Amino acid sequence: MPVTYKGWRIWTVKYEDNFKTMPKGFGYAQATAEVNRCLLCHDAPCSKECPADTKPAEFIRKFRLKNVTGAIRTIKENNILGGACGVLCPTNRLCEKACSAKFVSDDKPEGADRPIQIGKIQRFLVEYAWQTGFIPIEKKDEKTEKIAVVGSGPGGLSCAAELAKNGYPVTIFESRPEPGGVLRYGVISSRFDMDFLEREINDVTALGVDIQCNSPIDKKAGAEKLLDDGYSAVFMATGLWAAASLKNNKNEIFGLYSSVDYLSALRDGRFNEMVENIEDKTVAVIGGGSVAMDCIQTASKIGAKDVYLVYRRSYAQMPAEPEERIEAMEDGVHFILLNQLTDYVVNKDNQIEGVKLVRTRLGDSDESGRRKPEIISDSEWVLDADVVIEAIGNTALENSPEWYPSVTVDEKNLIKVAPETGKTNVDGIFAGGDAVRGPALVVQAVQDGKTAARAIVEYLKN
Amino acid sequence: MSKDIDLSVEFCGVNFKNPFLLSSSPVSNSAEMVEKAFDAGWGGVVFKTLNSGRLSIIHPSPRMNSINYGNQKEVAVQNVEQISDRPLKDNLMDFLYLKKNYPDRPIVASIMGFFEEEWAYLAKVAEDNGADMLELNFSCPHMSIEGSGHKVGQSFHLIEKFTSTVKNSVSIPVMAKMTPNITDMREPAMYAKNGGADAIAAINTVRGISQIGLDDWVPKPNVFGKSTVSGTSGPAIKPIGLKFIAEMAQCKELGLPLSGMGGIETWIDALEYIAVGATILQATTGVMHYGYRVVEDLIEGLSDFMAGRNITKITDLVGKALPNLQETENFELDRQGVVNFDMARCIGCGQCVVVCHDAGGQALDWDSEKRRPLPIEEKCLSCMLCQFVCPVQGMINYKEMPNSWQRKETAVRDSGVEKDVKYEVFNKEPPKVCSD
Ligand SMILES: Cc1cc2nc3c(=O)[nH]c(=O)nc-3n(C[C@H](O)[C@H](O)[C@H](O)COP(=O)(O)OP(=O)(O)OC[C@H]3O[C@@H](n4cnc5c(N)ncnc54)[C@H](O)[C@@H]3O)c2cc1C
Ligand SMILES: Cc1cc2nc3c(=O)[nH]c(=O)nc-3n(C[C@H](O)[C@H](O)[C@H](O)COP(=O)(O)O)c2cc1C
Ligand code: SF4
């Protein structure tokens, strides 16, 4: 909410407080304390659960034995975005889940009573490297083959770093004005801030990676053309930048946003405009995933009068992390569960005034294993809202297949690759991240980038 | 806490309501401090070592360094503090104040001189101003002047000389405080006894180096670019203190009452010192770490332990463990055992497997499916390393095996190389040693 001072409304205060920076991570003493709790397991379960093959057991042991630089190296050599992952990974269902799940016993001694906070330790070590100026990565001999990476999100950055480490000159082509992909234009600053992102991107450019912003590869057959222009291989990591919407192809409705557009706006200079739209207004967010949580969290922080979350299944089926859901409730968000959007209510000026909802009940499980919502007939009602944000899934841009017409895509326009190499059907073109998997995780995009980079190195040997 | 427990002790004719004394150090630097300690429950004090005023004492700054282990702070402390920097007269006035206000708490005056007249002078003024007992500091570990501090403690004839000087100057009991920076304390203790000492106190700090600054190569504490070998105290030195006390307690020829110290923080530490022969106890680092309040837990913990065992007098426990402290040749080596796992309590961390393979008998296989160790009993060395690392207390225990049980010998890696081994059985006898 803006602060009023002598009739002036002061935004900056709230902006700084609520949006610009994320909470501080562990300091040295806290990190040491947490590391000392670790049991240093044999055959460590945590080290088997990271999608990017991070070995927490190894960096924790190194830290414990005061080999702090070695611990940093373990993280960063494997994952150039180790800091981002430390902050953003849903560790409670990855490494940290493995940490606690293994202890099947009546006894819960110290260290086994709750998982070690691996993500926080990882973040600390990466920040500590920045603080102390330690550079953990060495480059190999210079190679000559140039490689193009399209997209500077986690997938692109990870691939570029891995190739640069191996001595290859890499150029990243990025359509937006700044690098980072979802890390910059999606995830809200209060969860992951720009300072942190800049530093971690520095680690990539320090390896010699060249990032060309404002350089979309979106002409017809743009990717294939890169191969013709002298790049020996191309890695596509363009992500998902269209939003699923009920609206599809209808006229523009004022006050209706996709999550992609809304969250980008908070970051790309349209912040104040967005604040004007939301402050003291009623906001309805449609969806139940982490992105929906980011939307409601920002809306309540900006100072919306009421924030509604509309979700078609029930609380237990929401894909958002438990902490996010609890936090949203604490923030005063109203959860409207078992309700499905059917249409928008719009006035004559095409300004949104509410959403038409229909009540649902849970039926049998669907293929995701969650119970399916079934519509209850004659239960329509209208929820008044000044702003509606749809957070019901990001998709590939409709025209994206034209950027690489020879590459096979599926019915959702996701690029098809061999999972163990990231190879597409076209020689020399590789792909990974959300553009291949659909909505996934930072850590998975990182792994795809690494996998593809290793496959590219092999490919170039032949 | 049981009311019938008697923690009082008589030591060289001086009565203490409990055996816990502040040892001579910053914790006993002034009456203002000692008063607070007495209010908290301490049974007595060994006041910070008096100086005669002949030399001006300036403490180096900074004067201490903490040795930490993981999150555990002050596992040991390193100090280069000197004897009291207060004017002698101030200290003596503080004696008078304490005697007046706390008549039931004995004051032991710690003194250190450099030559006979100085020792005699200090002993006399301490006695004249109410000290109930003297402690002769033969053990300050960072004295560089020959004939002072631990240098005396290492020159045994000086111990005898200075002790007898003091004994001839006063009538209150005299205790000699020994340095651990020697091999065997019984010998200097005998010199002290011959000089007339009524008791022995041990140990003062252990000479050491706690830490090196890696940016400037200056060890800690860093006194403006310089450091020195100096005294280590606290929990880490407890094994050394216990050893010296035990050896002196077992020495019949010595036969003097002992005041034990070195790493006492809890009632268990205290009881261990008592069990190896100490009658009164002293502490500094425990107080530097936690404050005077630790005495509440020393008293309560010890009393409750005694109540639980139906022991009413603390003095009944002095030396309790000594009969069991023997030479290795007396061990019954034909009795052997293995470890026993209470597998239902196992949490599956596998630390035991790591250490057994890398430092034990390779007696634990690993079931990676169930995440459990698989003991191979006949290979177990009973080294107990697995128990040391196990986070579940009491899950891994020692089990004696029947006499018929045989441990499997550690296999030779490749018996194929036997033909290449260069080896002859050793069959010589040691040379005869001349006994006179
Ligand atoms: C709001 C939100 C919150 C999220 N929160 C989390 C979280 O907390 N934890 C987590 O693990 N995951 C989270 N995710 C998912 C995660 O961000 C993605 O899985 C990850 O960013 C995918 O990385 P990527 O490199 O494949 O794509 P992106 O990050 O989408 O990057 C693609 C990049 O390619 C650029 N690009 C697109 N087209 C072109 C073109 N034609 N030419 C040049 N450049 C192009 C884009 O501008 C963008 O910079 C979140 C996602 C969203 C949307
Ligand atoms: C900072 C410091 C100063 C000390 N000063 C003296 C002293 O002046 N005279 C003395 O006899 N012992 C002195 N000692 C030694 C202690 O009295 C005690 O013998 C030693 O610290 C071991 O006991 P502890 O482990 O309980 O600390 C000092 C110890 C410390 C830590
Ligand atoms: S006691 Fe030693 S040899 Fe026996 S199982 Fe434990 S670690 Fe292995």
Image (cartoon, rainbow, N blue to C red):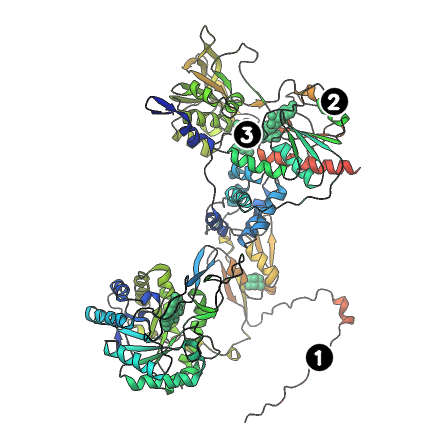
Question: In x, y percent, where is residue B305?
Answer: 33, 65
Query: What's under tag 3, amino acid-wise?
Result: Arg
- Marks 2 and 1: in contact by CB < 8 Å? no
Q: CA distance from mark 3 to mark 1?
A: 75 Å
Q: Label 3: few (<14), some or many (≥20) within 10 Å?
A: many
Q: Which residue bears the numbered disc 2? A: A406
Query: Which residue is at 40% across, 18% downward?
Result: A282
Q: Quadrant of the C terminus of chain B?
A: bottom right
Q: Which residue bears the numbered disc 3? A: A184
Q: Quadrant of the N terminus of chain B?
A: bottom left
Question: In x, y percent, where is residue B373?
Answer: 57, 55
Query: What's under tag 1, amino acid-wise?
Result: Val
Which of discs 1 and 2 lies nearer the camera? The answer is: 2
Q: Which residue bears the numbered disc 1? A: B425
Query: Which residue is at 73% across, 26% downward?
Result: A226
A209 to B363, vertically: above or below:
above
Sequence-first tag of 2 and 3: 3
